[in-house]
Image: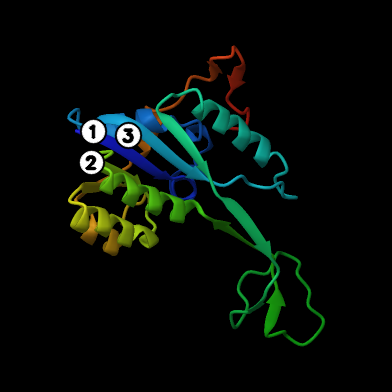
Amino acid sequence: MRTIVYIDGFNLYYRMLKERPSKKWLNPLALATRILQPSHNIIHVNYYIARVSARAHDPLAPARQATYLKALETVPEISIHEGSFMTSEPWMPLAQPPQARPAGYIWNQPEPNVVKVIKSEEKGSDVNLGAHLVRDAFTDAFDVAVVITNDSDLVEPMRIAIAEAGKRVGLLVPVKYPTQSLMNVASFYLRIRPGHLAHAQFPDTITSSQGTIISKPASWV
């Protein structure tokens, strides 16, 4: 079965990789190949992500991400589709009573009802994934699509690909308890387990087709 894999990069990261640094050097093609049955001929992997910006608490994050994206580019079957981040400073209401003050926090004025926060939102990735999934379904680019996500925003694109284009669309879910609406619409679903990640890592050092050496970030141990 001609199979295309669509990966919600940030959903996978925050659900499975953020707290597992040693598993971040992940080869998504190897991961999908390990989990899916041999009847799936994986012809392409689409990886959807946005570039992170430098933050005070982790200024090296953009460099590590750039290194990882270079590693992905060494796999011919993988295409990277970049969205973007939008940062704003909205006023947001406080939970009552406030629950997450840093240690030593002192507020010497009456409790505010709202505070200004820095809010970063990823834009474009889920829209791109859904649009590409529907397009590929109607152009007969695959027999089976496999989506790695737990984002319910993708329910409708999956439903269209299945019900209106007549394709099978499965889920590889990065959580123990997947979103029910996704399970309801999917043709099948399988859970990604930590052991799958461990057996789908890039070598610590990769050589690109141009001869460039790409090394796993030192903190990913």
Vertical relation: 38 (above or below) 191: above
Please state which amino acid type lies under the numbered disc 2: Val
Vertical relation: 2 (above or below) 119: above
* Mark 1 element type: strand
Instruction: Name the residue beneath numbered marker 1.
Output: 2
Nearest the eye: 169 or 183: 169
For the N terminus, the image quarter is: top left
At 34% from the left and 39% from the top, the residue drawn is: 5
Give the number of the disc on residue 48.
none
Vertical relation: 89 (above or below) 94: above
- Disc on the earlier residue, 2 or 1: 1
For the C terminus, the image quarter is: top right
Give the percent coordinates (x, y) of residue 23: 47, 34
Please state which amino acid type lies under the numbered disc 1: Arg
Please state which amino acid type lies under the numbered disc 3: Ala
Give the number of the disc on residue 32.
3
Residue farthest along the bottom direction in this orientation: 110
Give the percent coordinates (x, y) of residue 168: 20, 47
Residue farthest along the front direction in this orientation: 139
Residue 221 in view in this figure: no
Local packing at callout 3 (Cα closer than 10 Å; few below 14, some 14-19, many 20+) is many
Nearest the eye: 50 or 141: 141
* Mark 3 element type: helix
Give the percent coordinates (x, y) of residue 13: 48, 45
> Given contact means CB atoms under 8 Å apart, are the residues at marks 3 and 2 in contact?
no
